[in-house]
Image (spheres, rainbow, N blue to C red):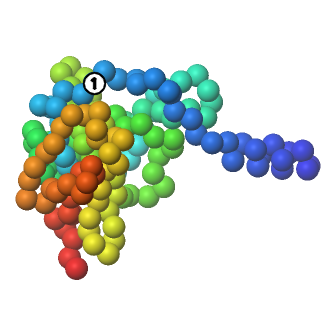
Amino acid sequence: MILTLLLAQTLVQMPIVSPVEPVFPPADPAKLSLVIVQTVSETDPIPLCAQPNCTSMFLGRYKDAVTLAGPALPAEFSARIAMGSPWDRPYRLALIVEQRDGQEPLVRAETGFNVRTGEGCFEAKDTDPLNWRPTGERVHWQRQALCLTDPAFRP
């Protein structure tokens, strides 16, 4: 019984790992969109490495999309997103999505929003490799961080 509990605890506490090398070729900045979405679901995981605790590319479904910069995305769309596991509930997120020829769109970066300010900022480590500096009414830069304000935010 104790051995079973220890094994279960070990499995629950196993950290998620991601591949060290980039999995996808560099993004085409002309095909990047900055969009605010409501998550719907994450299905069809494709593991990114051989370890059992590796991140996977889930097929994320999104709704109520508002494109702030780049090519417009439809109000409802699907895109591949790297995750350790699916979201436990719906979230409002900002995404940088690459629209790829002949393939599913790919989420290159994501961030949530501060509930008090309505602001979301991407980490520079996620956006710097994209070589993309979008501009727009609700888009601004804080040092090296790409930030935006949720249009639905009401102070």
Residue with the most extreme front position: 143
Pick whichever, 123 or 39, lies toward us.
123
As drawn, 107 above or below 92: above
For this rendering, which residue is in front, 106 or 58? 106
The spot of residue 28 in percent (x, y) is 18, 27
Q: Total marks drawn?
A: 1
Q: Position of residue 84 (x, y in %)?
A: 51, 41
Residue furthest bottom as drawn: 155
Graded by Cα atoms within 10 Å as few (under 14), some (14 to 19) or many (20 or more), the crowding at tag 1 reads: few
Q: Secondary structure at mark 1?
A: loop
Task: Tell me what residue is drawn at x 76 percent, y 44 percent.
Answer: 10
Q: Quadrant of the C terminus?
A: bottom left
Q: Residue at x 21, y 63 (%)?
A: 150
Q: What residue does disc 1 label?
A: 26
Q: Give residue 134's quadrant in the image.
A: top left
Answer with left or right where residue 98 lies relative to residue 108.
left
Image height of 57 relative to 35, above or below = above
Which x, y percent locates residue 31? 15, 31
Quarter-of-image position of residue 130:
top left
Q: Residue at x 34, y 34 (%)?
A: 80
Q: Is residue 125 visible?
A: yes
Q: Position of residue 49 (x, y in %)?
A: 53, 24
Please indicate whether residue 61 sits to the left or right of residue 71 in the image: right
Residue type for callout 1: Pro
Residue 74 visible to an observer of this rendering: no
